[in-house]
Image (cartoon, rainbow, N blue to C red):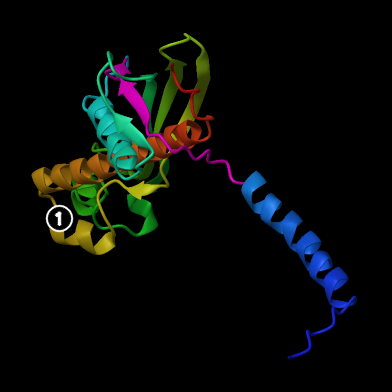
């Protein structure tokens, strides 16, 4: 009969010590995760985005960006008001553009960013403006409120002020301006394209901030 291996008294304390050392690390990782996981998907109703600004299309962009984020997260189900446990209200209260850099003809430019006229024409005419916006930023302010539709409790209410993009060119780089020369319509199209991209980027930024707040809310207690 094979003799049983004697118990090593040294191994047991070492094993326990290893567990003690590992446990805080595990707890730390979970405690510092802002996401609350739930075995049951959270049903969410998103009301139409209220936009009190004059920037057309921004409410639709924000709604689409937020829905894309939530669609990738299996812990959420976007549903109607009757079947949702949570409700989300969104409002765009401010939207603007701000010029961050200008250019002038006396800075060695041949064509201003606006494309309204080249510098030679300005010098010959003497009356056309010799300054133009070169870079700008876009800004938006969003208010968000999440409500437990069963209890009426406000889950979070926040104001996201002056969310902004990085500076972007009003038209393009120097080679673009030179090639477009005085074709004002092409300058306008390029500006509209850059402005549209900035609006889309703002919607993504706002949606991400709202999504981060949603996943930080503890799952609702089950209804019985």
Give coordinates of residue 154: x percent, y percent: 51, 14
Give coordinates of residue 101: x percent, y percent: 42, 45
Q: Quadrant of residue 25?
A: bottom right
Q: Residue at left 90%, top 75%?
A: 9
Magenta residues, as a range?
32-51
Q: Is residue 3 above or below residue 196?
A: below
Q: Residue at left 20%, top 51%?
A: 118
Q: Is residue 168 above or below residue 163?
A: below
Q: Main secondary structure of the magenta part?
A: loop
Give coordinates of residue 197: x percent, y percent: 26, 44
Asked if residue 175 lies left or right of residue 185, the reply is right
Q: Which residue is mark 1?
A: 181
Q: Residue at left 21%, top 56%?
A: 177
In the rendered picture of this protein, how many numbered marks are placed on residues? 1
Decide if residue 32 is in sight here.
no
Decide if residue 149 is in sight here.
yes
Q: Is residue 124 above or below residue 219?
A: below
């Amino acid at each position: 009969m094979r003799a049983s291996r004697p118990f090593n008294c040294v191994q047991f304390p070492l094993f326990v010590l290893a567990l003690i050392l590992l446990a805080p690390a595990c707890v730390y990782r979970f405690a510092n995760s802002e996401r609350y996981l739930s075995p049951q998907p959270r049903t969410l109703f998103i009301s139409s985005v209220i936009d009190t600004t004059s920037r057309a299309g921004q409410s639709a962009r924000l709604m689409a960006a937020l829905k894309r984020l939530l669609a990738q997260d299996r812990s959420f189900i976007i549903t109607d008001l009757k079947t949702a446990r949570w409700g989300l209200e969104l409002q765009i209260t401010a939207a603007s553009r701000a010029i961050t850099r200008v250019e002038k003809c006396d800075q060695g430019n041949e064509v201003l960013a606006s494309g309204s006229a080249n510098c030679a024409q300005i010098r010959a005419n003497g009356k056309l403006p010799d300054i133009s916006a070169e870079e700008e930023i876009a800004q938006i302010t969003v208010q968000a409120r999440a409500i437990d539709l069963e209890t009426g409790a406000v889950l979070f209410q926040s104001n996201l002020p002056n969310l902004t993009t990085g500076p972007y060119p009003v038209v393009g780089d120097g080679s673009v301006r030179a090639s477009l020369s005085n074709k004002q319509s092409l300058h306008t199209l390029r500006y509209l394209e850059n402005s549209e991209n900035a609006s889309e980027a703002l919607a993504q930024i706002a949606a991400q901030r709202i999504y981060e707040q949603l996943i930080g809310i503890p799952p609702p207690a089950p209804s019985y």
